[in-house]
Amino acid sequence: MIARIFHILAYSCRKAALLIEKKRIYGLTSIEKLRLKMHLNACVLCREYDNQNEIIHNSLRHHLHEDQTPCDHHLSEEDRKEIKEGVRKNTD
């Protein structure tokens, strides 16, 4: 009986992965948090994915906030023309 209730309430690994991403960007509802927590308590792989995702998210956030200087990398006019010609050839 408990296993059946758990199966109904818990998410699949695919759904858990989506919610792990969502919680870092948008946040989760109370129900989503509960169901994700249940899944993470039972699934070692998703728990590890959550940990790795948090490391990547924090690293990117730190890097993006640290580097607030304007980007000075621009394509030369010659490179732009070459890319446009390549795109034009591939779409014809």
Image: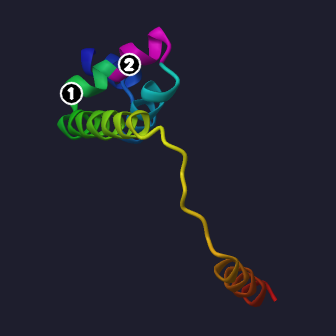
First in sequence: mark 2 or mark 1?
2
**Residue drawn at x 68%, y 86% as measured from the top left:** 82
Q: Name the one closer to the observer, 48 or 44.
A: 48
Q: Is residue 12 magenta?
A: no
Residue under label 2: 35
Is 45 placed above or below 77 here?
above
Label 1 neighbour load within 10 Å: few <14, some 14-19, many 20+:
few
Q: What residue type is labelled 1?
A: Ala
Q: Quadrant of residue 21?
A: top left
Residue 60: image tag: none
**Residue drawn at x 68%, y 83% as measured from the top left:** 78
The prevailing secondary structure element of the residues shown in magenta is: helix
**Residue drawn at x 32%, y 33% as measured from the top left:** 58
In the rendered structure, which segment of residues is drawn in magenta? 28-36
Question: How far from the left and from the top, in percent, is residue 41?
Answer: 21, 23
Residue under label 1: 42
Q: In the structure shown, which secondary structural element does the residue marked by tag 1 occupy?
A: helix
Q: In which quarter of the image is residue 53?
A: top left
